[in-house]
Image (cartoon, helix red, strand yellow):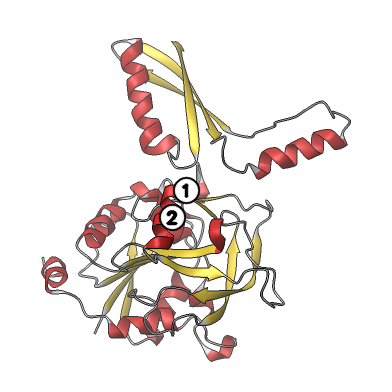
Amino acid sequence: MLKVAVVRFPGSNCDLDSLRAAERAGTHAYFVWHRDTGLQGADVVILPGGFSYGDYLRSGAIARFSPIMQAVQRHAADGGPVLGICNGFQILCEAHLLPGALMRNAGLTFVSKPVDVTVERTETVFTCAYGAGARLRLPVAHGDGRFVATDDTLRMLEAEGRVVLRYVPASEASPLQPNPNGSANHIAGISNAAGTVVGIMPHPERVAESLLGAPDGLGFFTSLAAWRPRASTLNVTSR
Amino acid sequence: MSYRVHVRVMPRESLLDPQGQAVEHALTALGFGEAAGVRVGRAIELEVAAPSRAEAEARVRQMCDKLLANPVTEDYRLQVEDA
């Protein structure tokens, strides 16, 4: 059974939802604490949403240096999958596991509502269960969600097809306000080149069961079933 | 020697600063129409023990590059004085 470690920082608040969504997808999911130094042999790591360390200094800036993140860095460097959701995405950018940064929303207000996004990249560990171009309705809940990067980085992300989720642009018919935060190129989520490290602002774990409406987010977790640890990753986890 | 270092972290010029814009609008609404180009950043002060002023500055630059400022979105300036 695939082992999924959900990292808990002081201030995480989507940890339980993420754990449950991973369990619903048939994985063995468990929590690891920010002070832990190992991932207990995890195949996959989830950095959940919340306000780690009170968002002091910058969102994710302090969490990035917590002891568990050294283990996450090694896991990612060895090709291990990591999904960062909302605050988790901010932490991945601060940790330089993903390029760019997430700044204060252009409208300055905290935005908490459903948005429509398209799945732009399905060749990732977390989105391979979706069809290319699939449209999802996922909740966002953030104050610092405006993705920014240098022009060169944006060009690289687009050229390499590393934009994973994009807010449905204003020109398309949508009852919901597009691009809730002023992100460059309407970017809602990106990945590393290999598609193993993914960061997204929307919360798929909050819409992962039909009791809560259309389970548009479950695919991020069922995608894991299609992924098999490579030999090198297995060696790392058995260390 | 101990030095007091003032770090001024500002959003990069080329990036949208919605906080600065909001403050500017508020100033205009309060009758301060002459205020322009408002930007909001962050000030950090710290004391550093170091053998010399240059050493103190070099160490704080490392702190800025690693933690105190985000190199993607922010620029910083230092001012070092005797503590």
Mark 1, other Cα within 10 Å: few <14 / some 14–19 / many ≥20 = few
| Residue receiving disc 1 | A151
Q: Which of A135 and A114 is in front in this view?
A: A135
A208 lies left or right of A84: right
Asked if residue A200 can be seen in this view, the reply is no
User: Image quadrant of residue A143?
Assistant: bottom right
Q: Are marks 1 and 2 in contact (CB under 8 Å)?
A: yes
Residue closest to the eye, A64 or A120: A120
For image coordinates 54% across by 81% down, the residue present is A135
Q: Give the quadrant of residue A7.
A: bottom left
Secondary structure of residue under mark 1: helix
**Amino acid type at image mark 1:** Asp
Q: Can residue A55 be seen in this view?
A: yes
The structure residue drawn at horizontal position 54% and vertical position 36%, both measured from the top left corner, is B12
At 62% across and 44% down in the image, what residue appears? B16
Judge from the rendering whether residue A22 lies leftward or rightward of residue A107; answer left or right: left
- Viewport quadrant of the N terminus of chain A: bottom left
Distance, label 1 to label 2, CA atoms, is 6 Å
On residue A88, the disc is: none
Q: In which quarter of the image is the C terminus of chain A?
A: bottom left
Of residues B76 and A47, the one drawn nearer to the viewer in this rendering: B76
The residue tagged 2 is: A155
Q: Position of residue A186 (x, y in %)?
A: 56, 62
Circle 2 sits in a helix, a strand or a loop, which is it? helix
What's the residue at 37%, 26% (across, down)?
A: B61
Give x and y (percent) for residue A91: 41, 54
